[in-house]
Amino acid sequence: MATLNPAADAGARAARRKWTPEKREALFGFFFISPWIIGFLVFTLGPMITSLVFGFYRTDLLQVWEVVGFKWFQAVFTDVLVRKAMFNTAYYAFIMVPLSTTLALLIAVLLNQNIKGQSFWRTVYYLPSVVAGAAVAILFKWLYQPDIGLLNSILNPILFRISDFLSLETPLVAPRWVFSQDWAMPSVIIMALWGAGGAMLIFLAGLRGIPTALYEAAKIDGAGPIRQFFSITIPLLTPTILFNVVLNIIASWQVFTQVLIMTQGGPNNATLTMVLHLYNTGFSQFRFGYASAQAWALFLAILVFVLFAIRSSSSWVQYER
Amino acid sequence: MAENTATITESVALPLQRQRHYNVGVILWRVLLYIVVLWGAVIFAIPFYWMIRTAVMPPYQVNLFPPQWIPDSINFVNFRAPFVGPFPFARWFGNSAIVSVLSSAGVVLSASFVGFGFARLRFPFRNLLFIVVLSTMMLPEHIKLIPTYLLFVQLGWINTVLPLIVPNWFAPPFHVFLMRQFFMTIPQEMDDAAKIDGCGWLGIYGRIHIPLSLPVMGVSAIYQFTFTWNDFLHPLVYLQQVDKYTVALGLRLFEGYMRSNIQDMMAAALVAVMPTIIIFFIAQRYFIQGIVMTGVKG
């Protein structure tokens, strides 16, 4: 930045000399975080805004770029299939979040009881969440196979005995799981519960953070194990519960791989979830504008529930001190 | 806890009868505890067992009814099926390995660099920007999917591994958070000492923070490896040629083809999940450490 004015030049030199340690530090600070800034702009903020813009277009991302206004955003509310997908996703999330959080908490509390071989048990319960994905969905499809699958070959004889015992006219039969409209979604949920180990580990870490002195004090005051659980364990674990619930809400509303592999959304759209539907709309039907509008609708739904969880937390989460 | 209970009951000197009654309760509770934990573990282990059992079973035995719990003989012939079939299974495996390893490397290097910046340097808007990092951690992936897809189409990266790797070289927020939390625990005095010895910021980062943060880098790498290995949505969108597939994607194709040969399918699935399981067992300690760090301080 050469200038003809010597006074300004001197000023600039003075300014350069003014590169105080603070300024140098700030400069280096931005240098260090620059990979994140670039990534954030290119792979997060940019795409987010762009997908909102796409929502106003009819587009196949190639030749067709036609502005359609709010059409897609209105269609999101009226399209029967989108409503079905929204309902299914909500169904999955509203069952999955409380159920898997409770299950994870239960296992963690049991394993925290000074149990022998804790690391062995922990591994057994945690391992399923390491292998999440396509292989697991394929495995469960086999377990759920209605005729010779493992699950029904255990359930059917039991149900037969029960029917016999109750002398029912039509004997009880195990559901056809992923082939049944009513049971397909529960099948997906049961499979997902198998992966509760991730949340369990987080709970175990949280439990380890509770000072044992509290339990000893409670014992001296005559509090039994159940009282201790509800008066010490649960309150002190509420931040961890919130953390798990929020993670779980975000993950549950995005359920995709499992349903794609196990049911492809069927039978009769009983497991069509939002991400699956927007994937189909975009990448199978090439209606990327509509898919983008759906993505935003889903994003807002997730945001509402996450914010609700966080806002409501002030009334049930207890932070120490 | 049992020992503690004993000492406390003694020290409070409860009447003998009540003390004994209490101990019976404790013993009953612990027996019940072990029964519940054991049964839970059995239920959690059965799907794995069933996968292995089906994979090593002789084909004639697989479709018998009622299902047989124990194979007549253990054989590995089913494991040949994925490799000799019409699909490039070994190639898929290689693709997954390349993508997972390079993604992990990118995450570790970039996130530790950025994490150091957030943990150690003061600059304007630092807290605000860190809040942005935290909130993007919660951002659902699908919202970025279509524009990112278009970006990669225009870069000509479809059917290459690049879209699966490159974004991971730009400091994914979860890992930045992990690294930053770890760097915060390194005493400031070490930085100050290095500064007095004439180290610049890069020197402090490279000579002090990197060597001290190898465990957390391990955590980060393992997480990313597992995540990328299991990832299905991104390969599905970016890879359309069969020979470019990752294992997760290929399994689905294989499944459509192998529908009736469940033993081959299970063998393929077992091979596909093996790397993540092996890595988990090698690095179990790091896994758990990572959970402790994110969970407790999060």
Image (cartoon, grey):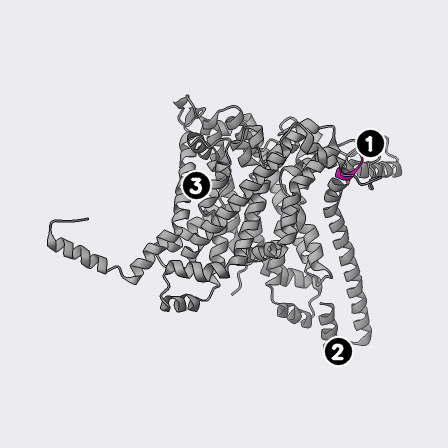
Quadrant hosting residue B69: top right
At 33% from the left edge and 56% from the top edge, which residue is drawn? A26
> Up-down: is B242 above or below A193?
above
Where does residue A201 sit, x and y in percent of width and height?
A: 62, 54
Q: Magenta region's main secondary structure? A: helix
In front of the other: label 2 or label 1? 1
Assess whether residue A276 is covered by the magenta stretch. Answer: no
Disc 2 and disc 3 on one polypeptide chain: no
Separation (CA) of disc 1 from disc 3: 52 Å
Between A304 and B189, the one nearer to me in the picture? B189
Magenta range is B55-60
Chain bearing tag 2 is B
Residue A44 is tagged as 3
- Image quadrant occupied by the N terminus of chain B: bottom right
Separation (CA) of disc 2 from disc 3: 64 Å
Separation (CA) of disc 2 from disc 1: 67 Å
Disc 2 and disc 1 on one polypeptide chain: yes
Residue holding disc 1 = B60
Chain bearing tag 3 is A
Mark 2 lies on a secondary structure that is loop
Which amino acid type corresponds to the residue marked 1 in the rendered image? Tyr
Which amino acid type corresponds to the residue marked 2 in the rendered image? Ala
Where does residue A257 sit, x and y in percent of width and height?
A: 60, 36
CA neighbours of label 2 inside 10 A, class few (<14), some (14 to 19), many (20+): few
Mark 1 lies on a secondary structure that is helix
In front of the other: label 1 or label 3? 1
Which amino acid type corresponds to the residue marked 3 in the rendered image? Thr
Residue holding disc 2 = B13
At 67% from the left edge and 71% from the top edge, which residue is drawn? A221
At 32% from the left edge and 55% from the top edge, which residue is drawn? A27
> Up-down: is A21 above or below A273?
below
Chain bearing tag 1 is B
